[in-house]
Amino acid sequence: MVDGEDFEAEDQELDNTTENTTEEQPQETTTEAEEAKGQPQYTEKGTRLDENPMSALNQQLANERAKARQYEALLNDPQKVKAYLAELERERGVGQQAQEGEIRPEQIQTIEDIHRYLEQERAKDRQELEQLKQYIGNFSQVQGVLAVGDRIRNDISQVRQKYPELDPRSPEYDEALEKELGELYEEIVRHSIH
């Protein structure tokens, strides 16, 4: 809960509305030519995006929020961080056997060996710190994406209040108008990225 708003409930709501309209597909990237032909678009997870621009935006926002919660869960639990780092070491083979030029504790015999061992351990620690900084940077980036998504959602809500023909719950709702505005918005976003 942030500032009195329960985002998890909103995410669940978004997940429920998008689950019925999506199909699991292998991850594909679409070109602008395919998009123009009406080919379906897919999320990073490989889930087919809804044709309704609002639903597609909600799908993407829910996916980003889920990703942020996963990052938060990892970073807030020291045991999970340790387990992740241990798994990373196993995958890379670090710690399993000494690499060429590395010294293991049982090989220490002189003061120079101690210095060399300590320096190699410091280097490993620095590398792990850099990896953690990168993960934290990714987490911050996801938070930024969520903030943009929230701002877009608030803007949409304000527009729907001001213009009832864009509010699906209003008797004055015009689905064709909303779809046309959504397509224009997507085109603007697509051109601003390139």
Image (cartoon, grey):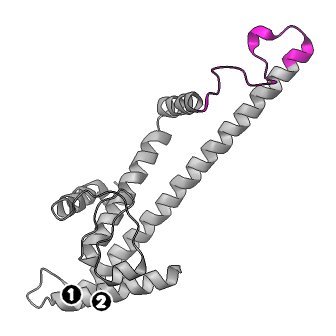
Mark 2 or mark 1: whose residue is earlier in sequence: 1
Q: Secondary structure at mark 2?
A: helix
Query: How many C-alpha atoms fall within 10 Å of the one at disc 1: few (<14), some, or many (≥20)?
Result: many
Asked whether the residues under the numbered discs 2 and 1 touch, taking CB atoms below 8 Å apart as contact, a structural biologist would say yes
Quadrant in which residue 5 is drawn:
bottom left
Could you tell whether 173 is left or right of 128 in the image? left
In the image, taking residue 180 as reference, residue 149 lies left or right, namely right
Q: Start and end of the magenta stretch? A: 92-114
Dot 1 corresponds to which residue? 166
**In the rendered view, would you say 119 is above or below 15?**
above
Q: Is residue 164 visible?
A: no
Magenta stretch encompasses residue 177 = no
Which residue is outermost to the left? 171
Across and down, in percent, residue 19 comes to: 19, 59
Quarter that holds the N terminus: bottom left
Residue 181: image tag: 2
Q: How many numbered marks does the figure carry?
A: 2
Q: CA distance from mark 2 to mark 1?
A: 9 Å
Is residue 75 depicted above or below 38 in this figure?
A: above
Tell me which secondary structure the magenta stretch mostly adopts: loop
The residue under the point 11% across, 91% down is 172
Residue 7 falls in image quadrant? bottom left
